[in-house]
Structure formats: C-alpha cells, structure tokens
Image: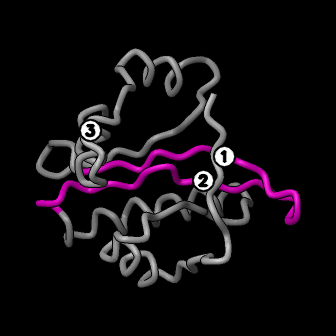
Amino acid sequence: MLQLIRELAAYEREPDAVVATEEDLLRDGFGAEPKFRVLIAEWDRGAAGFALYFYHYSTWLGRAGIFLEDLFVKPELRGKGIGKALLMELAKIAAKNGYYGVKWEVLDWNQPAIDFYRSYGATLLNEWRICRMSL
C-alpha cells in the first residue's frame, strides 16, 4: 500500500512529499478504530491500484457519505477497468449503507482523471475551494 501511495505522489508531481510509514498505515487503518478504509485492486496477482477512503457527515443532507482521499491505478494498467471497478465498489458501499454518495478532490491539471470522473457522472463543484489548516 505504501508503495502505491509513493507512486501516486510521483504521478502528482510530489515524489518527496510522502512521510507516512508502514507503521502509520497499520496503526491508523488496521487497528481497533480505523481512521480509513482501503480497497486494493490486483492484476496478475500484484497490486494494481487502490482507493483510500473514510466516512464523513453532511449536515445539510443529514446523512453520512464517503470521502475518497486517493484513487490510483498504476499507469501501465490504466484503461483495463481497474479505476472503474474501484469507483463502482465505493458507490456500492455507499448505497448499501444508505449514504448520500461519494465525494473527492481532483487536481485541476489532471485532465485524464477529470475526464474519467465525468464519464461516470461525477459533477465538478468549481465554486468550492479546498481549505486546509495544518498543525
């Protein structure tokens, strides 16, 4: 999983930005109270991609939803339906649990991803801006 995260960072032009360790991921994703969930896609018995997500709540809708933190498929395996399978599995999880849906962010320069998301009915909310307070 960490290797896939590093490959994603390289793709997003931030190859040295990953500071997460295997211990961090094990602690936060696989302990008694997981902070995230992850779907790992395989191709030819190897890791092909992943979708890391967590739950959040919409005060306006009065329902929970899924926030997709990262969706990544190895470049050499794109176009094989892996990204679609991951995205559709998240939609199934949301529907099964009565969530309002799935939301995520995409870099404005990542036109292949934008086109991919739009092809599955995603709406880009251009009027919203991402805010982050780092501690």
Q: Is residue 69 magenta?
A: yes
Q: Which label belongs to residue 47?
A: none
Q: Is residue 5 above or below residue 82?
A: above
Q: Amino acid at mark 3?
A: Arg
> For the residue labelled by badge 1, is the local secondary structure a helix, a strand or a loop?
strand
Q: Is residue 46 above or below residue 71?
A: above
Q: Is residue 61 magenta?
A: yes
Q: Main secondary structure of the magenta part?
A: strand
| Residue at left offset 26%, top offset 41% | 4
Q: Is residue 53 above or below residue 130?
A: above
Disc 3 and disc 1: Cα gap in Å? 23 Å
| Residue at left offset 30%, top offset 31% | 2
Mark 3 or mark 1: which is in front?
A: 3
Q: Which label belongs to residue 67?
A: 2
Residue position for label 1:
55
Q: Quadrant of residue 111?
A: bottom left
Q: Which residues are magenta?
A: 49-77
Give neighbour class at mark 1: few <14, some 14-19, many 20+ (Cα, 10 Å).
some
Q: Quadrant of residue 83?
A: bottom left
Q: Is residue 63 above or below residue 113?
A: above
Give neighbour class at mark 2: few <14, some 14-19, many 20+ (Cα, 10 Å).
some
Q: Amino acid at mark 2?
A: Phe
Disc 2 and disc 3: Cα gap in Å? 20 Å
Tell me if label 3 and label 1 are in contact, CB under 8 Å: no
Residue position for label 3:
6
Q: Amino acid at mark 1?
A: Tyr
